[in-house]
Image (cartoon, rainbow, N blue to C red):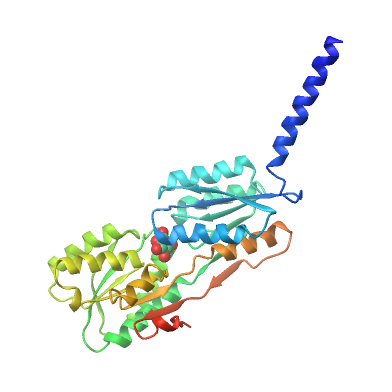
Amino acid sequence: MKKYGIMMMLVLISVTLFANGQSDTQADNGKEQYVIGMSQCNLGEPWRVQMNADVKKEAEKYPEIKVVYKDAQNDTLKQRAHVEEFVSMGVDLLIISPKEAQPLTEPVAKAMEAGIPVIVLDRDLVSDNYTQFIGADNVKIGKALGEWVVSELGGQNAKVVELMGLQTSTPGQDRHNGFTDAIKGSDIEVIFNADVKWLEPNARTEMESALARFDDIDLVYGHNDPAAHGAYLAAKAAGRENDIMFVGIDALPHEGVAYVKDGILNATFQYPTGGDVAIREALKILNGESVEKRIVLGSRIFTADNVNQGGAAID
Ligand code: FRU
């Protein structure tokens, strides 16, 4: 009798444990729930906070998915570890916005080997051993920005300061290459450039050096709006902000676009986060549909002339 009681208890315990284990993968409607791991390289910048918010807002529409977030706090080693953790958790799909191309390539390949589909968002890797890449074309954005600078300042021997995004990340490389290509053959001259690693405080410090070295600066090209804004603050502190034009990339409504409205930036180019697209594509992958290898998102330019009309598409 006693033995029977113990056995019943064990059965009850294991049923309860099993049910709990399962509850993670059951949606409210009782259907199977997929777990998506979202590896974000940092949440210290408004654009990345926006990306996660876009992922969350879209994911909330679908009860059959649950997103687990990890923030690598701008630390590549931490992000590698996060990818490995998602693999050992056995997530159904991984979305990654990698800090750097090279070091994240191998962990992503390992996730693929383990049978986990991977969507790479915004920053690319060095190999395309992933299911899908989603992001805007940074060469094209850098080129459109360069062409805009030539149209504004060409023929005036304009002097430019370029504050670059992290050069071990693909958008930093592509935004530099596109711009360099566009100003080739013009009289626009880059007199100072530095890798500010996407960060506003670095941009401010580098701009202080540029201001100290050069009496004549016509325009600052920040690879993102925080870089352009950091440069603006340095110029303002030196009383030179009205002599210089400032151009950036991202165009978040409450950041770059607001700076254009306030007359701080002369232009900003939109860089969509793709967070919502990633969720919709993830669902297709999880449902066994085939998806495009690369999804290229569009961009818009915002200047004082068009900011109140929602900017203009670049082509
Ligand atoms: C945020 C950010 C954006 C930029 C993007 C490039 O970390 O620096 O400002 O457009 O990353 O990957």
Q: Position of residue 252 (x, y in %)?
A: 42, 68
Query: Looking at the picture, how far across and down is residue 15, in whole percent?
Result: 78, 30
Q: Residue at x 40, y 78 (%)?
A: 143
Q: Is residue 231 left or right of residue 95?
A: left
Above or below residue 15? Residue 22 is below
- Where residue 296 sits: x, y (%)? 55, 72
Residue drawn 39% across the image and 68% down it: 254
- Residue located 30% across and 78% down the image: 266
Task: Determine which quarter of the picture holds residue 163.
Answer: bottom left
Q: Residue visible at 45% across and 58% down?
A: 48
Placement of 30 over or under 219, stated as above or below: above
Which of these two is toward me, 213 or 283? 283
Ligand 1: give its quadrant. Answer: bottom left
| Nearer to me, 145 or 7 | 7
Position of residue 215 in the picture relative to residue 1 (left or right): left
- Image side of residue 114 versus residue 215, left or right: right
